[in-house]
Amino acid sequence: MKIIHIKDQEHEMILDPLCAAIGNFDGLHLGHQKLIAECKRHNYKSAVLTFYPHPYVYLKKIPKYKLITPIEHKSDILAKMGIDYLLIIEFNEAVAKLSKEAFIDWLKKLNIRACVCGYDFSFGRQAEGTIKDLQKEFEFYEVKKFIFEDVRVSSTYIRELLTLGDITKVNRLLGRVYSVRGRVKYGTQNGRLIGFPTANVEYNNYFIPANGVYFVTVQLDYKFYFGMCNIGNSPTFNFTPTTRLEVNIFGLDADIYGMQIEVFFYQKIRDELAYSSKDALVEQLTKDRKKCYLLSEAFNFTK
């Protein structure tokens, strides 16, 4: 897959005529996958046109808008889907103020011949452009809303499920296992002192699940390990206002500080709780680890 970063409307035309799926595609859930599959069906090179940073950074003034799939993670997933081009438009105030006509002209300059969009897609200044405008100018393919298990699949709904910690349903709607990538950084070392050493993961711009303990797998240097992950604020010892993502990796005894890992979430074990003593916490963590070991024996895990 060829990745092209586009900073303004003067970008040179792409030589291959393109059929482009257009949208934010945060999460690349089953609904998004339907758009991408449609895009690949036609006789042009397939492309996904998306925006970075997320338009809400400007449109809703949320400078640190959290994402289910930050742009690097999204790029890797799209490459595995067999897309030919990923076009990343740098979203800023100038792009937000483009008229619908100017945006359509921009698409034509990029050599986009056909568009695939969701039924509710809008674009241009104050969302004045609709799919009807695109239908007049391009070969156009509309993808209706995607219903799965009696709900409309959307990034907003998946965020709600993550907030509830319903990882099992999140994974079904994503069509893959939800995961977070990040570097291992130094933490408080409290886990090591009580026999449960953890990798403190720098999760940056990810929209992470609700506080609690989760059964996970961890990918490190192309190897997979089982583990349990705690997301929270350490209410028993050294409370922190910043939410931490810490993983106890089973069977790994190595210095991995500074290394990149990916944590795959399968099931929430329990909520995060405060305990009256260190012994009470250790007793609960022992139960959690036992439950995770049982889960690791019961399922056949894949990437």
Image (spheres, rainbow, N blue to C red):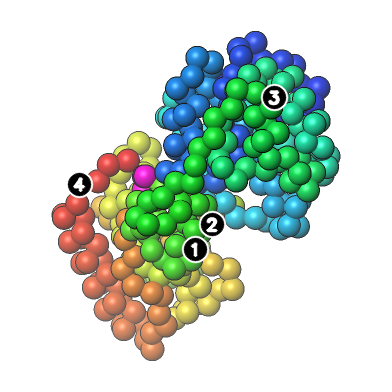
Badge 3 marks a residue whose secondary structure is helix
| Circle 4 residues within 10 Å: few <14, some 14–19, many ≥20 | few
Q: Which residue is mark 1?
A: 160
Separation (CA) of disc 2 from disc 1: 6 Å
For badge 2, the amino acid type reads Thr
Foreground residue among 122 and 232: 122
Q: Which residues are magenta?
A: 175-179
SS under mark 4 = loop
Do callouts 4 and 3 mark residues in contact (Cβ within 8 Å)? no
Q: Where does the image place residue 121, in percent across and percent down from the top left?
A: 62, 42
**190 to 78, vertically: above or below:** below
- Mark closest to the chain's N terminus, 4 or 1: 1
Q: How many marks?
A: 4
* Whether residue 45 is visible: yes
- Disc number placed over residue 300 in the picture, else none: 4
Is 178 included in the stretch rendered in magenta? yes
Marks 4 and 2 in Cβ contact (< 8 Å): no
The residue that label 3 is drawn on is: 137
